[in-house]
Amino acid sequence: MTSGERPLRSAGWFGTHDKTGFVSRAWMKNDGLPDDSFRGRPIIGIASTWSELTPCNVHLRQLAEHVKRGVWQAGGVPLEFPTTSLGETLIRPSSMLLRNLVSIDLEESLRGNPIDAVVLLTGCDKTTPAYLMGAASVDLPAILLTGGPMLNGRFRGETIGSGTSVWKLTEDFRAGRISEADLAEAEGGMSRSHGHCMTMGTASTMACVSEALGMQLHGAAEIPAVDARRGVIAHATGARAVELVREDLRPSQILTREAFENAIRVNAALGGSTNAVIHLLALARRIGVPLVLDEFDSLVREIPTLVDMMPSGRFLMEDFYYAGGLAVVINELGDLLHRDALTVSGRTLGAGAGVAPCHDREVIRTMQQPFKPVGSGIAVLHGNLCPDGAVLKQSAASPRFFTHEGTARVFDSIEEYTEWADGGAPEATADDVLVLRYSGPRGYPGMPELGNLPLPRRLLEEGVEDMVRISDARMSGTSYGTVILHIAPESAIGGPLALVATGDRIRLDVPGRRLDMLVDEAEIERRRAAWTPPPPHSDRGWVWLYSEHVQQADLGADLDFLAGGSGDPVPRQPF
Ligand code: FES
């Protein structure tokens, strides 16, 4: 078989009758594969981020079995393989430190092996962008399948959501509103099934955004992990991977400029995670699509938030699925999307969405009566604190802070902040601006999700629910509040955030898209001359390589030498 006019890539291993072919086939036969497996059938890699240290992805081996059935049925040969995985809740100091490493792991696994197409099995936050980035750099036919969200969490008759309810419940506990026993009971009801976080956090966002990009089958993003229909779509994904080889349909034909615009607009309608910004910027640079940070603002100014989901709203992914899911959102957005964008299904985005009736208008609203009005998407700010940009998720913020001036309380580490916040936060008021720095890509390292600083205990007890917080860190997609993130350039490389001091006045002007410290230029220059960079975190290994090469948040925090791709040539063979 050929892919279009091209011979199968795997024929470079299995298609010869010499020593190379003998060795390649003979050792694979210890998998129990019959000889016809190597006679012109497409080899479909099933790349998996399964790991018992990544609880959100722990069911991916079962899902792979469904994918394999589809591959066999369509005439291919499935070969499952692991890569490094990233469990958001466990891995330290930050899963983001390793996103690019996983992308390299996948890229080189694909390039070095006899694979004609790949099914990408992901779920937890960073696993999806890491795999999309790696696959884009190889540009083999590829199709994504996320593992699906958990069922709704339950606690004493209430629905609770991953992350979002954790922040709320632990703040209630800190403020003395609930007991330790209450907290333990909630902990037991949060994660009731396999699957990734079921709020519109980063995992659900990236699942939906990937479908809007065209890299998942229509309807694949939102089916709960334990719903039998996820097995059905896994089967279809495997079968489709074989067809991708026959059609020679590659990520570069799907991940177009139009696809990225679709993803950015869908993310706004979903009230999706700020992390999508950083991942899409990195992915665009891998596939060679021009995309800049400011477009995450300019492209969404006419998009309202349509979906009432945590952290911005009330519902969860299970509700979203039953309401009709992403197809309803795509149809609501209508011509605001490029409906003719090609997807991995072989159909366009619009055709894939089909008619898609909405079954619950509480969960998915209309353009005429949205959940949050036009202009509630991500705002990209500039100013003397963030010359290269910063982001604010307006739908999760308090509008009363959109035009605000307050006194800076500056902290160089989360430990320093926590000691202050739990120690009474002397003199702090609800109008202060909390500043966390040295938490960017190089500073921490790995740009952790620390930007949504928990409010000082004393202010919490007084009933304060939100404050302006700014940092060069990220925040969990499940978080909420008036939190300005991804400040670039970061403080660890001498960005102006490094020069702000406690007591300075900071002005936030969201309508004007500005974030400034009200310090005169001569004083800023004096501080700049006195500033010294922090010492490096390591002089060896991955942390050194990452710190030397990581780019700033406005470029997607990828490594500078990973932009673009190496393609999928058949490597030289050594014997
Ligand atoms: Fe894995 Fe949220 S912790 S998706």
Image (cartoon, rainbow, N blue to C red):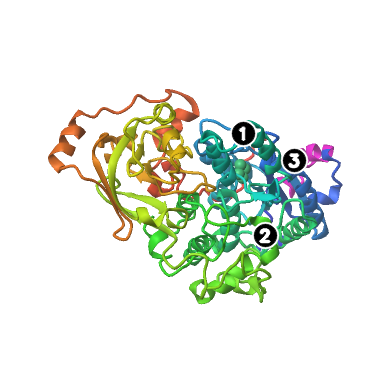
Q: Amino acid at mark 3?
A: Ser
CA–CA distance in space, label 2 to label 1: 29 Å
Decide: is 202 above or below 423.
Answer: below
Residue topped by disc 1: 179
Of the residues tagged 2 and 1, which is closer to the observer?
1
Residue 292 in view in this figure: no
Label 3 to label 1: alpha-carbon separation: 61 Å
Q: Tell me the tag on residue 24.
A: 3
The residue indicated by pointer 2 is 319
Question: Going 35% across and 38% down the picture, which residue do you hit?
Answer: 435
Residue 29 lies in the magenta stretch: yes
Total numbered labels: 3
Residue drawn at (67%, 63%) of the image: 219
Magenta stretch: give its range. 13-30
Locate residue 536: give its quadrant: top left
Of the numbered discs 2 and 3, the one sitting upstream in the chain is 3
The amino acid on which the numbered mark 2 sits, given as a three-letter code, is: Asp
Q: Position of residue 443 (x, y in %)?
A: 39, 33
Which secondary structure type mostly characterizes the magenta part of the structure? helix
Q: Quadrant holding ligand 1?
A: top right
User: What element does badge 1 sit on?
Assistant: loop
Q: Around disc 1, counting alpha carbons within 10 Å, would you say few (fewer than 14), some (14 to 19), or many (20 or more)?
A: some
**How far from the left and from the top, in percent, is residue 237?**
72, 58
The answer to whether the residue labelled 2 contacts the one labelled 1, judged by CB atoms less than 8 Å apart, is no
State the SS at label 2. helix
